[in-house]
Image (spheres, grey):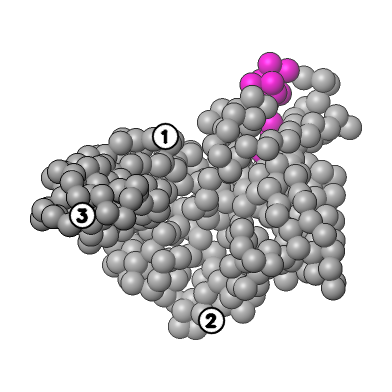
Amino acid sequence: MFGCRRSLLLGLSAFGAVSLGVLFIDAAWQLAAIRALDVWLSFGADEEVMGHHAAAAVEALRARGVTPFLVLDEGGAVASEVFPGVTKPVAMIGVAEKGTADLRLVAHGDGGHASTPKTGGATAKLARAISALDANPAPARLTPTAVAMFEAVAEVAARPLSLVLGRIGSASGLFARILTRLGPETAAIVRTTRAVTMLEGSKAQNVIATTATAGVNMRISVGESLDEAVHAVERAVRPHAQVELIGGSGPTQVAPVDHPAFETLRRVTREVLADAHVAPYVMNQATDARHFHAVWPHVYRFTPFHMSKAQRESLHNVDERITRASWLEGVRWYERLVEEA
């Protein structure tokens, strides 16, 4: 394999402008580099639409005989304000990502003129289906990765939170239920999520719809398959609507945290981002890394930039940004990673 003992896959695709000391960015990280001066850059332009570029890159690398020591894609940031009682920034390194699927709920009914409506039409059936889905969320469960994340955070949390998080594995069922009540971010840690997005009915104000549809975006928890997640939605909305699977895939495998690849990430982070404490986690978002993770086990997701809660909330939003200092620090992190790996 080009005379190399091992390989490192990374990536970079960023667009932005510097303004008033802050870098406004729309960034997707995908970098690839091979040890011993061989460097591979894998650029993709269709991640957001579940395209094929990353899958083609995987096949090209396999054809060249590349077996990576480490694959790194975009992922968790060096996040401050992660939990109450945790003042130290936490470097969230993704070791897996949830599956993702797009569904369509479809309800049918009699059409006609809006001046003479019937009860129980397509839109009413769809509304009942959506309400049923909202009232019956997926079961809550703490995965081993979630337990490991909370145990890592416990090491830098203030008392009594540190005592609670450090023992979360011994009462995982209870803590999973508590996390569902603390807000959407913590709820997403412990369950498959279902978000109703696009709605469609009649094409005119005075026409009763014969068909009404709703889009549902799912993020499927590690440990649950795509089929299981779809069947659960079908049970929830029956008999009000039918469920169509538009497309999707299940969660990835979980990359090990007891492997030299993860230790390399931890070591570089401690050196360059000295104030950060490393914790593994499962990404809720979908990245191109899932294509690599289907083939190779040591795939991780990390974006080495300090980000406040407000900056994280700006992702894919108005004024998406990081500071200039954080950007330069992240560049140094990537340099050290290539040197160390």
Say if residue 298 shows up in the picture.
Answer: no
Dot 3 or dot 2: first in sequence order is 2
What kind of element bears circle 2?
loop
Q: What residue type is labelled 3?
A: Ala
What kind of element bears circle 3?
loop
Q: Do the residues labelled 3 and 2 touch (CB within 8 Å)?
A: no
Image height of 303 relative to 53, above or below = below
Image height of 185 relative to 122, above or below = below
User: Quick one: 258 or 124, which is closer to the camera?
Assistant: 124
Q: Mark 1 points at which residue?
A: 247
Dot 1 or dot 2: first in sequence order is 2
C-alpha distance separating marks 3 and 2: 56 Å
Q: What stretch is highlighted in magenta?
A: 58-71
Quadrant of image for the N terminus:
top right
Q: What residue type is labelled 1?
A: Gly
Please tell me whether mark 3 or mark 2 is closer to you in this view.
Answer: 3
Q: Which amino acid does label 2 sit on?
A: Gly
Numbered label tally: 3
Residue 211 lies in the magenta stretch: no
Q: Say the numbered circle drawn on residue 267.
A: none
Residue 291 in percent (x, y) is at 57, 32
Dot 1 or dot 3: first in sequence order is 3
C-alpha distance separating marks 1 and 2: 40 Å
Q: Name the residue under label 2.
A: 85
Residue 65 lies in the magenta stretch: yes
Q: Mark 3 points at which residue?
A: 114
Residue 159 in percent (x, y) is at 49, 83
